[in-house]
Image (tube, helix red, strand yellow):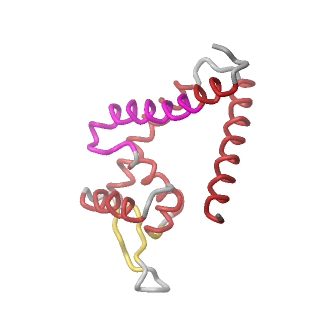
């Protein structure tokens, strides 16, 4: 690898940054297939569990997806009995999404799969390497968020 060639290294880094989530998603899809879930669904169940009840818009914003995409996901989870929609206590026009006992049970069952993959992907990293990687990923995230914000204002 020619590390002095900026275009070459930038391209390789971008390809790796795109490949890693696809590989992670493929592994997770295989591990949670027995539950009949897609890889994007357990994190939603976990987030609802952590936050209580949320609107579909809040969920769409958190997971950086379009509201219709989140609506489809919510409908699937609701059909499976993992979540339910109920009117907001302060505004009956607003529907809030909350976990059902069945949803919490499946969240707990899938959680161990996510934890084992998270542990495995950093298995041979030293604590110092993990800290450094975290700092670098935070910088990448900040750069992307700044770009996204700039795109919205132009």
Residue at position x 29%, y 37% in the image: 33
Position of residue 65 measured from the top left corner of the image (x, y, whole percent): 46, 57
Residue at position x 47%, y 68% in the image: 57
**The image quarter in which residue 121 lies:** top right
Residue at position x 64%, y 29% in the image: 10
Position of residue 125 measured from the top left corner of the image (x, y, whole percent): 65, 20
Foreground: 49 or 78? 78
- Magenta region, mostly helix, strand or loop? helix
Task: Examine the structure image and report whether residue 123 is included in the region drawn in magenta.
Answer: no
Point out the image quarter for the C terminus. Answer: bottom right
Position of residue 77 measured from the top left corner of the image (x, y, whole percent): 31, 57
Foreground: 65 or 27? 65
Residue at position x 73%, y 36% in the image: 135
Position of residue 11 measured from the top left corner of the image (x, y, whole percent): 59, 29
Foreground: 3 or 143? 3
**The image quarter in which residue 141 lies:** top right
Point out the image quarter for the N terminus. Answer: top right
Is residue 34 positioned above or below 149 on the image?
A: above
Task: Examine the structure image and report whether residue 27 is included in the region drawn in magenta.
Answer: yes
**The image quarter in which residue 14 lies:** top right
The part of the chain drawn in magenta is: 14-39
């Amino acid at each position: 690898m020619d590390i002095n060639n900026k275009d070459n290294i930038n391209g390789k880094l971008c390809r790796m940054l795109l490949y890693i989530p696809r590989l992670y998603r493929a592994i997770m899809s295989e591990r949670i297939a027995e539950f009949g879930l897609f890889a994007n669904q357990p994190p939603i169940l976990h987030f609802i569990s952590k936050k209580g009840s949320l609107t579909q818009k809040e969920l769409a914003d958190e997971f950086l997806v379009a509201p219709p995409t989140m609506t489809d996901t919510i409908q699937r989870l609701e059909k499976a009995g993992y979540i339910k929609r109920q009117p907001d206590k302060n505004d009956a026009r607003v529907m809030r999404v909350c976990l059902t006992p069945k949803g919490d049970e499946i969240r707990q069952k899938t959680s161990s799969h996510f934890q084992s993959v998270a542990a495995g992907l950093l298995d041979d990293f030293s604590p110092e390497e993990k800290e450094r990687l975290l700092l670098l990923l935070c910088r990448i995230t900040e750069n992307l968020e700044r770009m996204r914000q700039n795109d919205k204002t132009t």
